[in-house]
Image (cartoon, helix red, strand yellow):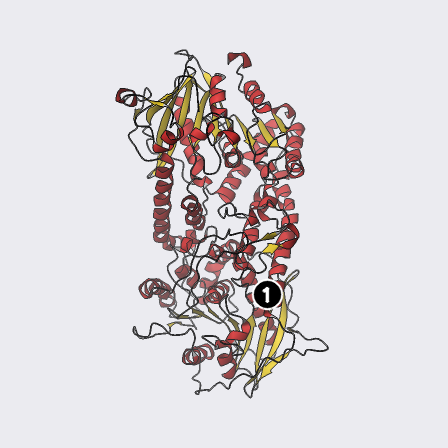
Amino acid sequence: MIRSEVTSVRHVSMAVLGLLATAVILGPSAAQTPLSGTDRLLEERPLDVVMVEGIDRFALRELEIAKRKRPSLWTLDYTSSDAYERSLHLFRDRFARLIGVVDNRVKANGIELIATTTTPSLVTENESYVVHAVRWPVLDGVTAEGLLLEPSKDPIARIVAIPDADWTPEMIAGIENCDTHFAADLAAMGCEVLVPTLINRDHQFSGNAAIDRQTNLTHREFVYRQAFELGRHVIGYEVQKVLAAVDQLELRNATADLPIAVVGVGEGGLLAFYSGAIDNRIDSTVVSGYIDQREKVWTEPIYRNVWGLLTEFGDAEIAGMIAPRSLIVEPTPEIPEVNRPPAAGRNIAAPGSIAKLDRDSVGTETQRVSRHWTKTKEWNEGEFVVIKRSETDSNHAPLDTDAVGKMVSWIVDSPLPSVTRPPSGPDRRVAFSADDRQRRQVKELVDFTQRLLRLSHRERDARFGAIDRSSLQAWVASAKPVRGQVYEELIGKLPVPSVDPKPRTRQVIETSEFTGYEVVLDVYPDVIAAGILLLPRDLEPDEKRPVVVCQHGLEGTPMDTIDGPESKGFRAYKSFAAELARRGFIVYAPQNPYRGQDAFRTLQRKSNPLARSLFSYIIPQHLVTLRWLSSLPNVDADRIGFYGLSYGGKTAVRVPPMLPPTKAEPGYCLSICSADFNEWVAKNASVDARFSYVWTGEYEIFEWNMGHVANYAELAMLMTPRPFMVERGHDDGVGIDEWVAWEYAKVRRHYNKLGIGDRTEIEFFNGPHTINGAGTYDFLHRHLNWPKDSQ
């Protein structure tokens, strides 16, 4: 607690009041006195809660606005089939990139039968079809495994049948119990059927025993976390498996040009839907239990989170990329319902669920879907079909035999006689293990992603290596567009704030050395910036002083950076904001919105579908704050520095690099990253480091394609020519010195090469995850041109 004549005010927020519980409360008159030039702050709720709730409303509203805007983004040519296909080309490319379908597939050379000298590939057979265990290549080091069902007569169609993630291929092939045996029904009706194994929702292989890490992450989330950081996705990987299956079926079509279809249920429905949208070799797409309005995708499992998806691609728009080919939809069958994974090992899985689809909601989206076939009806060869069920038949299994019969008739464009599927025989494989197959499939994707991680620096090096380093001036000029690209691609950029900030303040601290004011500023509708301003008491009326913005970390508040040794936050923050104020700096401690656990983490979920992140809001909050600080009579707008710990250190490499001072706007003239700087991409994506975020509950931390956009070294380079410093405790568990030094060495080299090596440094100290306040204070005094003896 601040000991020197500490007082507080009656109307202080509850967050501050809790931290000043032992302080003397001033009378009402003090509370009525705002900072000169501002209105009185009257909000009584904790400002962090107000902030997070406001951003939440803003994000949800933006999802609805995006839904209304999406149709206007699609300018398609409906004059002919060829014209329509050409007009879809760029949309398909963008969609494929968003779901991570960017890697070249291995050329199809035939489906491999899985057999050994003791176990043949034959799984089972009956008079209608035989079933083989198979695999086929997908990407370098990645295969798909599953079953091939071959009809006893010449096939009438070739189909990729995709189960829900909780079903094995054997289930839908009629070999094991399941609500639906649609792959077996398809084979009995004369179709050749290839069934891939999906990454399932178990957690058995979501860990690394070598480093004593086991989690309750589903296998899908386990792969998602690593892949997202590298611009890949578990969805994209499995779409690649489906498209590799199509490659194989097309190869088999060399002797008989048969219709090719993809058919899926639940998670398999998602994959069939996305595959049909990307690849026009697929003649028919059948989706059971998936198509719906997507504005609540943030409530679904996190492995369905796709960066930027809803800017252009709701389900109706995705369906438009299937038109004019056939799309058959079974709207609301009984699909496996999914809840947050149960406790097991490290309980870190993100919240999210899949529930039975709502008939009305699905109906609204399928109405939007139908317009594409209406507009192409003069020349299309396919059709959009919704498999109708009576309103009383709301509990039917997905793709039952009757539905499959209708579906095949539509696929082959010919009525079929009624077929009774004979029972499947027992599985003849003696030593087969579905768990072993799942382990192989998970491991292949993990290994592929970890290889991407190791090589991702090449793309970053190419991007930043292309910036002109012939002089400092050349670097600054040529780095400007790269800064814009990183902002857009990695963080997501909102419009520049233009609303009246309406500054509101109230005094919350008074000591013999400084006074403190709680501050609120408007940024966007419902979005505020907030913090505490510390003004040294010896300020002269016309004196201009430098400002240090002191940023708290995860689940923190501004008072954590101010309070003294008796406070909970002192161990980490060492009262560094108060100390800098005692040294004569003007200090501002912002409230950042990473507080409230799931309440703030779901902001990321609600923002990612529009290609936005938590820092999409934080950067404008800081811009509005800088504008206001620059307007204060005692602030030297050219000397505003940033110093952040932990998540505040994360802020230090994302906010100041994007806010350089310009003629039009104020900015940060330096940045200090404390207790956070790291080989950040590896810290997020590695499965071999105990301190990796793969093993923590911070499911919001992953940033789309960061590995190929900018790591911490590249973000720090964007500070150039402004000073940048790292503060690192040897015992800080966020990483290890070797990783920190490796990443910082690139920054040091960069500054040295430009002749400004004196503007960057790193301080290692004996200590944990904390402010050290030695070299960093010297750095601030030196580069903000404020004498040490002023304290």
Q: Is residue 51 left or right of residue 575?
A: left
- Residue in the picture at 41% in, 42% down: 596
Q: Is residue 443 above or below residue 155?
A: above
Type of amino acid under label 1: Gln
Q: Is residue 156 above or below residue 610?
A: below
Q: Is residue 30 left or right of residue 83?
A: left
- Residue in the picture at 52% in, 41% down: 485
Relative image position of residue 125 (x, y in whole percent): 58, 84
Q: Find residue 148 and report its image quarter.
A: bottom right
**Quadrant of the snapshot with the N terminus:** top left
Q: Is residue 554 left or right of residue 452?
A: left
Q: Is residue 559 above or below residue 104?
A: above
Please state which of residues 401 and 598 is positioned toward the viewer in this rendering.
598
Q: How many marks?
A: 1
Relative image position of residue 559 (x, y in whole percent): 43, 29
Relative image position of residue 336 (x, y in whole percent): 44, 67
Residue furthest to the right in view is 117
Q: Find residue 734 and report its image quarter.
A: top right
Q: Which residue is mark 1?
A: 438
Relative image position of residue 333 (x, y in whole percent): 39, 70
Please state which of residues 267 and 278 is positioned toward the viewer in this rendering.
267
Q: Find residue 448 and report its image quarter.
A: bottom right
Q: Is residue 254 visible?
A: no
Secondary structure beneath label 1 = helix
Q: Is residue 526 above or below residue 444?
A: above
